[in-house]
Every structure is written in C-alpha cells, then in structure tokens.
Amino acid sequence: MKVTALTKKYRIGQEIVTALDRVDLTVKQGEFLCILGTSGSGKSTLLHLMAGLERPTKGDISINGKTLSGMKEKDMALFRRKHMGFVFQSYNLIPTMTALENVSLPLIFDGSDTRERVGKARELLIQLGLKDRFRHKPQEMSGGQQQRVSIARALVNNPRILFADEPTGNLDSKTTKEIMEILREKVSQSGLTLVMVTHDNELAEYADRCIYMVDGMITQIVEKGARHEEA
Amino acid sequence: MNKLDLLQLAQKSLWRRKARTILTVTGVMIGTTAIVVMLSLGIGLNESQRRSMESWGSLNVIRVQPGTNYDNEGNPLGEAKRLNDETVEEIKAIDGVWAVTPAYDAGGEARFGRKRGGLQLIGVDPAAMENLEFTPLLGRLLEPGDRNVIVVGSEVINQFQDEADIKKMQRGMMISPGMREDKDPADIMDQRLTMELYSGTNREQKKVFAFQVVGVLEGEQKEHSYQAYAPIEDVKKMRRFLNQASGGSTSSMSREIAMKMGGGAVSVRRVGGSKSSSRIEADDYSYILVHTKDVSDTKIVSQALKDQGFNSWSMADQLEGIEKTSRTIQAILGGIGAITLLVAAIGITNTMIMAIYERTREIGIMKVIGATFRDIHSMFLAEAGLIGFFGGIIGLGLSYTVSYVINQISKDFMNRGMPPGTEEAIGISLIPGWLALFAVLFAIMIGILAGLYPANRAVRLSPINAIRND
C-alpha cells in the first residue's frame, strides 16, 4: 500500500483545519504497522483514508496498484468487503445480534450461503477461545470477549489488510495483552497486513514498524526492535 | 446480499422495536381495511344492480325492432329499416355477433286437455335457439327441422286454467285468481296444444294449429318465462293464413290475430312497430334477436346496429348509465379509503426515520464492513415493505370480517318485504379475488414508497461519524 502526498482538510464552521498534510507512506504486505500519536494528530484520519471510508482532499492511495480515490462508492464497499477487516476501540458489534451472527455479517453482505458462513464464523470463534459464547449477545460478554468477537468478524472474509483503531483502548492491561498477542500472531501466521492506530506507546513493541504523527505530519519512523524513547 | 437474508434481517430489526412496529402496522391495517371495504361496497352495489337487470333478461341479447331511431330531441334518425332475411344477413355480418334469429310474434288463446289460457307465441329459427341462452328445464330446445312443436317458459302453465273454473269465474262464483298457486311445469310437457285461428273480414275461415310441447325452459321471473317458442316456419304459416284472407300485405296495419275465446272473439297484439308501421310488409319479422358472447360485445354490437339505422334495444344499454353512477360512487368511497392509507404511509415514513436515528451507529458499522449503498437501501425498503405487507394481510383479514358483518346486517333489511321464495339478495359488500390481491400488493407498494425517503437518508449517513470512538 502506497500513500502519496495525502492531504485532508476539514471545514469546521468558518475555519479550515488541516488534518493531514502531504503524508507519504508505504506499507508492506504482511507488515504490522503502528501509527502513534496524540489525539488530534491525524492518525485516525489517516486510517480512515487508507480504508476508503473518507475521501482525501488531495493526494492518492493505492493498494496493490489500485487507486482508491478513483473508485466509486460501490466498488469501494466491495473492496472493503473482500479485502479489508476492521477492529475498533468500542468493538462496534451489532447489539441485537449474537456473537455468531455478528461474525457472519460481512459474509451475509457478500451473499454467501448460510452453511458456509456459519461454518467460518464458528471456526474463527473457536480459534479465538469463544467456543461457549456463540449465542451470546454483546452485552452478555466482557470487553475482552467482545473485542475477540470483533476480531473474528474482521477476519471472517480472509482480508489482506486489517485496520485497528485503538483496539485496546477500553480494555485492562491483562486483556490488552491477550488481544495484542492474538493480533500479532495473526499477522505472523498468515501474511496479513495490520495497520493499527493507538496513542499507547506500550503497544508499539508488538509492531514491526512504528510511525509517529504530530499535527497531521509524520515526524518519525521507527523500525522493529528500536524502542521508542520518549522525547 | 441475497433476498432471504435481507428479509430475515429486516424482520429481526422490526421485531426488536415491537411496540412501534405494531402501531405502524395497525395504521396500515386500518388504511387497507378502509380501502378494501369501501371498494367492496362499490363492487357489491354494481354487482347487485347487474344481477337484478340480468334477472330480467340476458345482458347478451339485443332486440332489433322495426321502426326508426330517434335522437335526444325526438327527431327520427334516417329511415326505418325493414326486418327481413336481407337484414338478418346484414346483422350477421357485424363483428361480435354470435347468433341471430328472426322472430315472429303471435299470440292468442290456446288450449290443452281441459285447460285454456292466453299464449304469447314467438317464432324463432330452431337452429339458433341453443345459442340464445335458453336452457331446457324439461325436455329439449327446438332443433333444426322441427315442425309443429313448441317449447314453453316455466310460467306458461300458470296461465292456463280449467274450463270449469273459468266458467265459475264468469258467473262470479270465484273471485279473480289473485293468489294463483304455482303449477308444476311438468304438467304441460308432451301435451298437444291447439290454437284456433280465424281469418277474413267476417272470420269466415277457421284453421286449427296444433303443437306438441317438447320442452320447458329454465328460469323463473324472466322475460321468456311467460312466452312460448315455436319454429318460425310454423308461425309464418299462421300469419300467412291470417293475412291471405284479410287482403294480404296492404292491410298489414289492421292485421289482427283473432282467437276464439269461449265464443267471443278477442283481438290481440297488432304486430309491428308504431310510427313507421306503414312501411312494414306482411312477411317482415316482428323483431330480430341478436346474441353476443359477453356484455362488452353487446355494447359494441348495439352501437353498430344503431349506426346502421336499426332500432335496437338491449338490457346492456341500460346498464351503462348505472355503471357510470356506481363508478362515481366507487371513486368517492375509494378516495376515502385512500386518505386513510396515506396517513398510514406517513406513519411508516416516520417510524423508519426514527429507526435511522436509533441505528445510525449500526448503519455506519455495516457500511464499514462492506455493505454497499444498495444493501443499506434495500434493508430499509425491506423493513418498510414488510410493515406494508403485514398491515395489508391483517387489513385484508379484517376487511373480510367487516364485509361479512355489513352483509349480515344489510341482508336483514334487504330481504324484508320481499316475497318468500325470491332469490336471496346478494351482499352489498363484495371482495373479489383481484381486490384482495390488489390490496396486499398496494399495501406493500405504499410501504416501499414510504420507505424511500428514510432509506435514502440512511444511505447518506457517514460511516465515520458512526464509528468515531465515543
């Protein structure tokens, strides 16, 4: 994935705010990339743009040679459906659906048949240690369990890129560790690309590479192993 | 996204806000019921009018009479047409005509056994009889080649009385037969019916015509119930006999069929039309019966006949005016129902907009994980459509109930004062199959239309706002 001179400006009232300012970035296949920054640094905006949820003011994103900004809304949705997965801070599960239904929802939109999608959803939930939670609704589960359901949902379509927006923001440190290990393992095992946004420096250690953002610009890129020193 | 999943999702999200869904469905239900019941009243009205007209005579028969047509101001339109074999051919050539028979009217007194009574005799083409909506109750219809046979209406028997009774009546011993009991039409079957005709200025010539009764026609209280039908050649012969003695065709105006009745002569029925009868020849038919396959043909043929200058009359012509009236009534009633359904539609829109506010986040998530605009759009339309569908189905059920109740109540009124034994009045509210189907489809359509605006709003929701961390 290649990001070139990406700029995003918002209009808030009379003022124009620049959320991203000519960002250039390349993400390799199978890489665990961590985007670090304080709130308002533009890290979430960058993630949304890379996922095609928003359109850039200027600049371009291409994934495997495909340019996102040229895509129609429908093709973008199909692209997300086929190749992307999402994990959020607040899990964003559908409250009225059971764990199993939540996980199979992306496949419902894809039109796959019931047996196939239930099979896949079960398999993933079992992998993530939720064997006895199939029929539970989100509010009947702990935060860690909900986040695991949401990871299962993100993976059910065998995506090539997984986007995670503060995936552990609502979790305690023990569960955070669990979740991060799951994500790390998935990336190492399956050649999945993971782009994670967080403000928690601790999590950077799981990543292959970290970028630091301030005021819509990348200020520092740190390769794996090199522990970030607080400046 | 396949259709079954779509409906399942829609049904699930409807069910989780039960109270609101039920209230909205109730709105549609009331709207549907209003429309269906209102329309059913209009249809019932139409149908009962049609039936009461039909009970008088078939809607598929046109009667072409001698004489001219008149416009609205009473001016004659064109010249009177003669009714003869040429005109019969002319009429046969008209599109939509199914069968044609010329007819001679004759009448007089007839007797069989010890009974006698008045008989209205009509000569028709025996070959055409089965195409003229006659069905035999007993025996058979006239068939090609028949001579000296007769088929009578079911009420004809009631016009005959015992010789002895008539004499008693004449002496004032019996008061007029007001409450005549119904006699069994089978009594007249296979009887030999005779008519004595006299001709000449002084009735010096006498001839007896005899007919074998071979059939009794089905249907009570119809035009034909009181008539008897004989092969046209036989009736022609009767007329020739009457005419030859009284001076042939020139005296057709004064032609009379004289019958013997207890010693006294009675003259009955001047044959022919009124105003232009001077042009009618002796051999001209009294009238021509034209038969069509259905009512719509009748109207077309009837118009065609009028255009060609025939003086035609059909029950269907009368029906048109009535239909116009009931169409107006139907439109008014349907309009009232439509307003109710419109209110229900606004209810659906409102419910769906509320649903969008509640489910902003959910819609956003679905978009993020790969729902297209179209998926979201169809999900909302499916929900709105389902509300319409359930409202329509339940409303239809309710309509049948309401319609049943209306008919029960109205039957009490309508059958009151009717003589016993008459056909029971049909309900004033009728729900034909097409109306039931239409009602449900219409309710679904209304639901979908009402869902369009909310669905478009749902599509426009930004997924970013939905998933932004709280």
Image (tube, coloured by chain):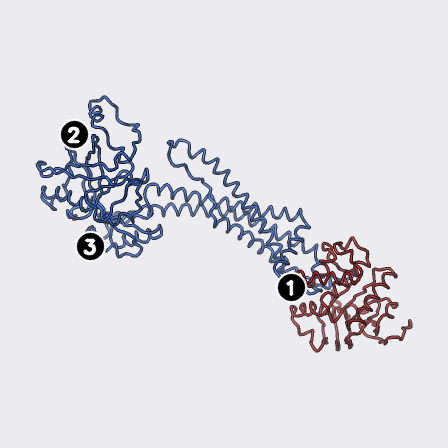
Chain colours: A red, B blue
Q: Please, is residue B399 above or below residue B188 in the view?
A: below
| Residue at disc 1, secondary structure | loop
In-image side of B97 versus A227 (left or right): left
- Whether residue B413 is visible here, answered yes or no, is yes
Q: Residue A144, located in which quarter of the rendered image?
A: bottom right
Where is residue B217 drawn, in percent x and y?
Answer: 29, 41
Amino acid carrying label 3: it is Glu
Disc 1 target residue: A111
Whole-angstrom CA distance, mark 2 to mark 3, is 41 Å
- Whether residue B72 is visible here, answered yes or no, is no
In-image side of A132 versus B218 (left or right): right
Q: Disc 2 vs disc 3: which is toward the camera?
A: 2
Disc 2 target residue: B262
Q: Nearer the N terminus, badge 2 or badge 3?
A: 3
Where is residue B299 drawn, in percent x and y?
Answer: 33, 51
Disc 3 target residue: B86
Q: Are marks 1 and 3 in contact (CB under 8 Å)?
A: no
Amino acid carrying label 2: it is Gly
Chain under numbered label 1: A
Where is residue B376 drawn, in percent x and y?
Answer: 65, 61
